[in-house]
Amino acid sequence: MSSENRDRQWWAVTIGVLALVYLIGAGIIVLAAAALRGDGGSGGDEAGGDNKAAITLSEFKIEGDLSVPEGGVELDVTNAGSVEHNLVVTDLEKQTPNIAGGSSAKLALSGLKAGTYEVYCAIPGHKDAGMVANLVVGGSGEATDTAAASGSHSMTQEEGARYDKAMVANMTQFLQIAGLAEPKLAGTKGDPTIENGPVTGNQKLAPTEILADGTKVFDITARVGKWEVEPGKVVEAWMYNDQVPGPWIKVNLNDKVKVRFKNLTPAMSDIHWHGIHLPNSMDGVAPYTQDTVPSGTDFTYEFVADRLAVGMYHAHSHGEQAVPNGMFGMFTIGDMPLPKGRTISGIEIPADVRPVLEMPMILNDAGNIGFSLNGKSFPATAQSATAVVKLNDWFIVHYQSEGLQIHPMHMHGFPQLIYAKDGIPLDQPYWADTINIAPGERYTVLVKADTTGAWVWHCHILTHVEQKDRLFGMAGAVVVTP
Ligand SMILES: [Cu+2]
């Protein structure tokens, strides 16, 4: 089967699955709405404890029967989304377990007094992304419109005008930080407690020393600190060398490499070299391949960089906590061979093509860092995820996902030639304007900036980039100057 056919088949399957998910989701919402209409005026027919209400969770909304009578109610909470969610009722200390996509859980609430209770999803980042709503107890007894209750769909003209104003101001901020609009804004810092510390991640790391036999020695220290993800939003970050993403380690093919790792995080850690060819004892999966590296201790990794690679490094111990919070970086060995002088789908790559920029694009969507590109959220992506090039320049991007979800990264204006996948050069590079990047994957692309302007470059799952009154998260830009 040709790779084109395989791609087509893959897309067909993906579209089929998505359609199914939507149908199931829509069905649940319709059922919830029907239940709501049926129960609306009949609260008095049942004892308080027999009341039921259906609530639907999805990315990133809470919908359903959000108006319930006083007394007791049993919430039937369904996750119609594709990732895990849960539901917390603030003030009542009630919470469902984590619910997998397509599953549901019951949550019994008793002794409910009239009032408004905030409900939200406690999976990190989900509340910020929109999974928060009000549960109204003992209102008029009338059914409340599903959408209006969750505030997720309806919008009055007045609200629209307010959101528009906020949205334009927020979008202008991006241009001001990028230096493309007046007055210019300074943008975010890195860890504000470190004077002159790194402001963005992916700083190229020079060897601390080069030994007599040519071994390049690098020092990596992990610790917990602060990181300004977007203007004014400083979060706790787990960092390598005080930056998110960690420094970019770039070595030549066949270099001898030594990495002295110091762990100052509160728990054991290690470094897994994702996509790098090395001995099992250097793979960084304590306690299987090496001893654990408890808090306050160190470990030295040593290997020969004997295969070309576009790799990542990240914590394996406590990865679920450490990685989303920032402990990830890029490790490259040599350069992926460019398809020079070839014509691919009618577009010629010049024999003397010389890219002016090689840029990491590391995705994250969880933990304290949240939805982000190269460790920053819009509008601070003006600092971390904006390629500035001249007309007709070629440039290279290494997409890598350290997140927990899939992100279709879409570049306005230009097709992207995917010429390596996971650090493996492709025999048949292909063009795409949207590239679906799953956790752990890397795609290396070549782009020609053949039209001037500021072009948006973003994840096309729109709830990963936009709320009613602002953009956030996974949106950057390609700025092409004359
Ligand atoms: Cu996304």
Image: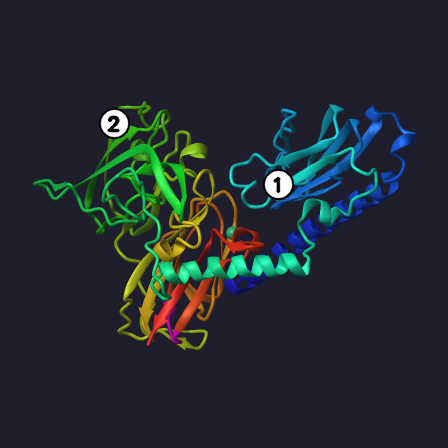
The amino acid sitting under disc 1 is: Val
Q: Earlier in the sequence, mark 1 or mark 2?
A: 1
**Nearest the eye: 107 or 429:** 107
Q: Quadrant of the C terminus?
A: bottom left
The answer to whether residue 421 of the structure is visible from this angle is no
Disc 1 target residue: 132
Which residue is most to the right? 45
Which range is magenta?
447-452
Residue at 76%, 38% in the rendered image: 67
Q: Residues within 10 Å of mark 2 (few under 14, many from 20)?
A: some
Q: Is residue 142 left or right of residue 162?
A: right
Give the quadrant of residue 52: top right
Residue at 29%, 63% in the rendered image: 357
Q: Secondary structure at mark 2?
A: strand
Magenta run includes residue 57: no
Q: Tell me where residue 149 appears, x and y as whole percent.
A: 72, 45
Disc 2 target residue: 298
Residue 14 position (above or below residue 278)? below
The amino acid sitting under disc 2 is: Asp
Residue at 35%, 55% in the rendered image: 383
Discs 1, 2 touching: Cβ within 8 Å: no
**Nearest the eye: 186 or 367:** 186
